[in-house]
Amino acid sequence: MKIQVRIAEVQDISPTVKAFVLDLQGQAFSFLAGQWIDCFVEIDGRTEVAGYSITSSPTEAGWFSIAVKLVGDNVVTDYMHEQAAVGETLVVDGGQGDFYFDPATAGDGKDNPIALIAGGIGITPIASIVRFMDKSMPDVPTTLLYSASAPAELLFRDEFEAIAARNPEFRKYFTVTRSAGELWEGNVGRIDADMLLGASVDGNTRCYICGPPEMIRDIANTLREIGVPDERIIYEQWW
């Protein structure tokens, strides 16, 4: 069902990504961690639409958030980066999508670890799951493996580090594909078998992947090679 929301906050969270907090204005809205919305905008007399993953936890009341990467080939994304401002209204429809975290799959927690594997802007639905786990299921062993093009593009990095610092059941692994010109002492390269095994990902781990198609294909194949069955590999791709 379409609803009208108000832009309550806009923040640059990387050189290429803006985050938006959207006020529900008292309207009912529900979603599962990992789902997305359609966003409708009137541009030059036409209604244009683009899909964006929700980044906030479904436990939040009265608002939700999205993050939009400037890609240069989408008029709605261009509008969100160049014109959308606090106080303006947007029409959205959601949440929707088959990629989401189902709390029922967590079982009794300790024996059902999950791995959240993200590449680039694919961190957006994963962030919703991380935030949900932090608020609602902190005892479930959760591992985040996150690859970005550069350190400055590691979205929500400070928040993820803070969660890991206070919750021993949450572990995070960051890697970048290039680090030239930036101070970076972490991993460089793509998420691979060594990183997955080093993070204790195995056949008992339920793995959620979001990122470019090539990354998803490669990681899904690697997960199979290290013993993760297909029914424990869940993925989302948009490209």
Image: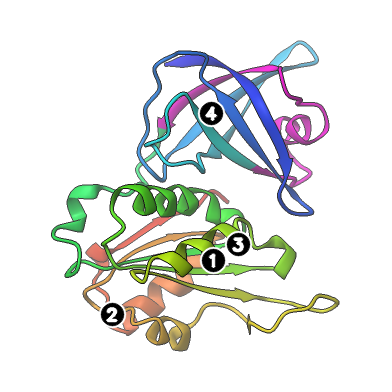
Which of labels 2 and 4 is toward the front?
2
Is disc 4 surrounded by few (<14), some (14 to 19) or many (20+) residues within 10 Å?
some
Is disc 3 surrounded by few (<14), some (14 to 19) or many (20+) residues within 10 Å?
some
> Residue reaching furthest front?
166
Residues marked 1 and 2 touching at CB (< 8 Å)? no
- Where are the magenta residues, as a range? 68-95
- Rendering quarter of residue 194: bottom left
Identity, as a three-letter code, of the amino acid under mark 2 = Asp
- Closer to the camera, 163 or 197? 163
Q: Is 215 positioned to the left or the right of 83 in the image? A: left
- Rendering quarter of residue 143: bottom left
Q: Which mark is residue 38?
A: 4
First-in-chain label (1 vs 4): 4
The relative height of residue 55 versus residue 161 in the rendered view (above or below) is: above
> Callout 2: helix, strand or loop?
loop
Quarter in which the N terminus is drawn: top left
Residue 206 lies, in percent from the top left, at 28, 65
Task: Please give the name of the residue rendered at 74% of the width and 54% of the height, measured from the top-left corner.
Answer: 14
- Rendering quarter of residue 78: top right
Q: What's the coloring here?
A: rainbow
166 part of magenta stretch: no
Identity, as a three-letter code, of the amino acid under mark 1 = Glu
According to the image, label 2 marks what residue?
Answer: 202
Q: In this view of the protein, can residue 204 be seen by the observer?
A: yes
Q: Which mark is residue 161?
A: 1
According to the image, label 3 marks what residue?
Answer: 157
> Residue reaching furthest right?
181
